[in-house]
Amino acid sequence: MNDQANSVDERYATTPATLTSWSRQDTTWMLGLFGTAIGAGTLFLPINAGLGGFWPLVILAVLAFPMTFFAHRGLTRFVLSGRAGSDITDVVEEHFGVKAGALITLLYFFAIFPILLIYSVALTNTVSSFMEHQLHIMPPPRALLAFVLILGLLAVVRCGEQVIVKAMSLMVYPFIVALLFLAVYLIPHWNGGILSTASVVPAPSALLNTLWLAIPVMVFSFNHSPIISAFAVDQKRQYGEHADERSSQILSRAHLLMVVMVLFFVFSCVLTLSPAQLAEAKQQNLSILSYLANHFNNPTIAFAAPLIAFVAIAKSFLGHYIGASEGLKGLVLKSGRRPAAKTLDRMTAAFMLVVCWIVATLNPSILGMIETLGGPIIASILFLMPMYAIRKVPAMAKYRGQASNAFVTAVGLVAITALIYSLLS
């Protein structure tokens, strides 16, 4: 057994982790990370981020890459610090004990699973509306439509994690093209929009308050923590001791792609629409695509919007499924039950299908609140837990003393306090 382990270590040690050896699998993961992060929330980001005015948006744009990259790199390093093959729930238990492992696993599941339910509802609503308003056909009963859609996505899930990531990476291409098309389409319609607020520099207190409340919006628009654990496990399997270096390279490229693409789309929207129009879109609870379709009365956008939304929601559903199923399996195993791996996979898929189907059929309006409640938990796991581990866990001691640690901790505290304030106000 030791000889086998040594041979594996030698194979990892000789694996080059340089940009010249960039593989197709690395590209697949890069696009998979992009696909999990950039979903339906992106279609509301121009409204939420643009309402604060020009200067807060510029500051958020500058902070977007470091906020996204350093936080997710920290969580990746945390998972990599555990034993080979250990996911995030196992690593927490390894570093902080059985009770802490069980608690974090529970919180991890309840932070991600509600988002999966929200995507189930949103997917059903999007397809139903598309059939009725664009295709002019009567959609099937909601229960049947929801069942078929969720079953179709779970069929992809049943093919395995690698197939999920590949499917997501393929779905990213039309989404990138669609975002680029829309951003470029709006260029002739730029009329200054948010620039009307550029001449007024807000008072420092007002600026800080706006940024405080806006940072969570930016953080969760780029959040892909549900897939980070699976990503880190695969990097360790592929690159061994070089996993940290290679995963950082993949993350940096994925985040650069996210930030450039999304901010181009955001600025194109806010340069087209005035602050008053952005406020109207928020009041109507419309995505930026729906508002633009109505604003321009453009049949192309009206037809393309739900298709883009479908792709965005479907790929985010797949990415969040990885995290939610990981959490559920962890809960089952930590309860003392040890079913066979295939049996556990089937039990997890069956549970997800039934619950997602019931919620999508019922179409409850409370899901937005559930997502908000999960926000502080996600921020704690993404920002604070890895930074705490760097200070306390010997395996992560080599990362101590970096300025990025203080930055990630500060952003995490800002995001959590702002989310709690939003809940209480």
Image (cartoon, rainbow, N blue to C red):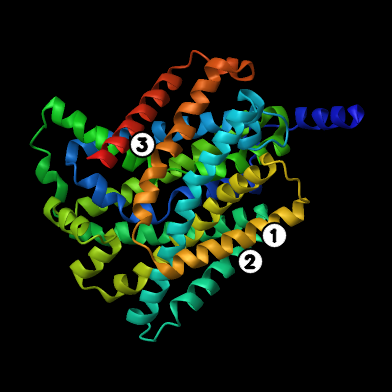
- Residue 339 spot, x, y in % from top left: 76, 50
The reply to whether discs 1 and 2 touch (Cβ–Cβ < 8 Å) is no
Circle 1 crowding by C-alpha within 10 Å: few under 14, some 14–19, many from 20: few
Circle 3 crowding by C-alpha within 10 Å: few under 14, some 14–19, many from 20: many
In the image, what residue type sits under mark 2? Ala
Disc sitting over residue 64 in the figure: 3
- Residue 284 spot, x, y in % from top left: 20, 62
Asked if residue 421 is positioned above or below residue 193 in the image, the reply reads above
Question: What is the CA distance from the residue labelled 2 to the residue labelled 3?
Answer: 35 Å
- Residue 95 spot, x, y in % from top left: 63, 24
Residue 366 is at least partly visible in this image: yes
In the image, what residue type sits under mark 1? Arg
Relative horizontal placement of residue 351, taking residue 39 as reference (left or right): right
Asked if residue 144 is positioned above or below residue 269 in the image, the reply reads below
The reply to whether discs 2 and 3 touch (Cβ–Cβ < 8 Å) is no
Question: What is the CA distance from the residue labelled 3 to the residue labelled 1?
Answer: 39 Å
* Tally of numbered discs: 3
Relative horizontal placement of residue 2, taking residue 20 as reference (left or right): right
Of discs 3 and 1, which sits in the foreground?
1
Which numbered disc, 3 or 1, marks the residue that appears first in the sequence?
3
- Going 52% across and 51% down the picture, which residue do you hit? 320
Circle 2 crowding by C-alpha within 10 Å: few under 14, some 14–19, many from 20: few
- Which secondary structure, mark 2? helix
Q: Which residue is mark 2?
A: 155
Q: Which residue is mark 1?
A: 346
Which numbered disc, 2 or 3, marks the residue that appears first in the sequence?
3
- Going 42% across and 54% down the picture, which residue do you hit? 39
- Residue 198 spot, x, y in % from top left: 12, 39
In the image, what residue type sits under mark 3? Ala
